[in-house]
Amino acid sequence: MPTALSQNISRRVAVIGAGAAGLIASRELRREGHSVVVFERDNQVGGTWVYNPQVEPDPLSLDPNRPVIHSSLYKSLRTNLPREAMGFKDFPFIAKNDKERDPRRFPGHREVLRYLQEFATEFEIEEMVRFETEVVQVGFLEDEKKWKVRFKKKGCDDDAEEEIHDAIVVCNGHFTEPRVAEIPGCLFCLVCLSVG
């Protein structure tokens, strides 16, 4: 069944996030003939698989002015799925016979990141990615039936820039900030956790 994006009309599409979902979405959209721009706030592809040993000073994200350190991994993390289940159909996640690689069926996070980086290289996705660029707002323009994307380049104090796109694909995941359950009477627990 044809969709609005697949009726042989090239659209300008913004993809937010260059993790696994953003990479595959970008490749498929370009294969369909669309003009794709990928916004990635990190300096590399990989999304949640990019390891950062730093931790936030406010692990519960209670302070809106805290420095945000995105990493949902720990140093010794291994996958809980076999590599065969994690690969893309036309780009299998095959163990490499190389001493620098992790040949285990349930590899560590670094091997998953390398796989995603190899995928991005193989399909020339990085040329579509604007690294260190964070989307700060997306809004629908009712009259034009288009999307306005506001974004900021990392380290730039200028106002956010804006672009207009025909479609948006949101692939930014949901592990950036902790989700703290609201439990009546537990405010004291949250305060203790945030300062301890």
Image (spheres, grey):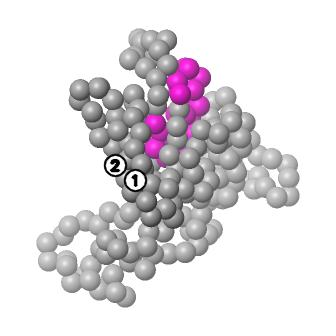
Q: Is residue 42 above or below residue 27?
A: below
Seen at 46% across and 44% down, the residue is: 16
Quadrant in the rendering for residue 191: bottom left
- The x and y percentages for residue 92 are 69, 36
Seen at 34% across and 86% down, the residue is: 195
Say the numbered circle drawn on residue 137: 2
- The x and y percentages for residue 38 are 52, 41
- The x and y percentages for residue 145 are 29, 26
Quadrant in the rendering for residue 138: top left
Q: CA distance from mark 1 to mark 2?
A: 9 Å
Circle 1 sits on which residue?
160
Closer mark to the observer between disc 1 and disc 2: 1
Residue 76 colored in magenta in the image: no
Q: Is residue 126 above or below residue 187?
A: above
- Secondary structure under tag 1 reads loop
Q: Amino acid at mark 2?
A: Gln
